[in-house]
Image (cartoon, rainbow, N blue to C red):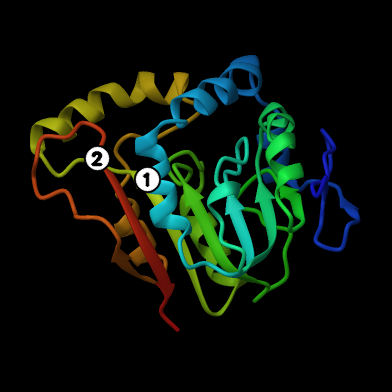
Amino acid sequence: MGGVHAPSRVADTGGTERVPDETTRRYAVRTWWEERVLPRLVDVALNDAVANRWRTLVCDEIAGVVLEVGFATGKNLPFYPTSVREVLAVEPADLAWDLATRRIEAFAPPVTRIGLDGASLSLPDDSVDVVVSTWTMCTIPDLEQAIAEFRRVLRSGGTVRFVEHVAAAHPRARRIQSRLQPVWGKVAGGCHLDRDIVAMLAAGGFDVRLLSPADEGRFELVPFIAGVATPVR
């Protein structure tokens, strides 16, 4: 198995272990619902042909060292091309990491769990070629800091490739999202229905190119977008 699993410690890229910082400690204190139930629900919910089409779109044409934020149960691994030589996984839920074992073992390049929180990466500057986020930036508590970390660890020419659900452009859908958010956030592990992720990436110093048509005001309560974000140097 390519990954490294320890409930209270995570491996760095050299195969050693580090004591989590305070940000990571907050991720380690997770509720029973977040740790034992949500990983299974997400594994089932994002296991259909629609989700796989989005994965295909995002994972196409990537190469080198991949940092996957929100690794979950490893569902992206079968979609990575042979040009990927290593996957560094950020995943807060131990159960999700355990459920990924079969996919990790079937994946030829090494897969290592290097952290719990995308906003606190135990990686050197300029150390990865691609950051992959599939339905994850909606849940990172400090997304602004995570975006800064993505910029820090990306090598020159590197990109963030993502698919996310985002704030609706349709006014009525946006109002419904705002009303649902307080409850939704509690049951969905801190997920935000109404984040403008493209705007947040742009504010964090990225130029974003969409891979999917933008929501042009259609009524969609949970619109998805996919894109490639390139650091503006």
Q: Nearer the viewer, residue 45 or 25?
A: 45
Per the rendering, the mark at residue 231 is none
Secondary structure beneath label 1: helix
Q: x and y percent of residue 117 in the render?
A: 63, 46
- The answer to whether 88 appears left or right of 52 in the picture is right
First in sequence: mark 2 vs mark 1: 1
Q: x and y percent of residue 198 in the render?
A: 31, 57
Q: Residues within 10 Å of mark 2 (few under 14, many from 20)?
A: some
- The answer to whether 207 appears left or right of 33 in the picture is left
Query: Mark 1 is on which residue type?
Result: Arg
Secondary structure beneath label 2: loop
What residue is shown at x 28% (from left), y 22% (from top)?
A: 180
What residue is shown at x 52% (from left), y 20% (from top)?
A: 41
Q: Quadrant of residue 205?
A: bottom left
Asked if the residue at tag 1 contacts the one at tag 2, i.e. Cβ–Cβ closer than 8 Å, the answer is: no
In this rendering, the answer to whether 229 lies above or below 107 is below
Marks 2 and 1 sit apart, C-alpha to C-alpha, by 15 Å
Query: What is the number of callouts on the image?
Result: 2
Quadrant (top left/top right/bottom left/bottom right) for the N terminus: top right
Q: Nearer the viewer, residue 202 or 21?
A: 202
Q: Nearer the viewer, mark 2 or mark 1?
A: 1
Task: Determine which residue is flagged by label 2.
Answer: 223
Task: Determine which residue is flagged by label 1.
Answer: 53
What residue is shown at x 68% (from left), y 57% (from top)?
A: 87
Quadrant (top left/top right/bottom left/bottom right) for the C terminus: bottom left
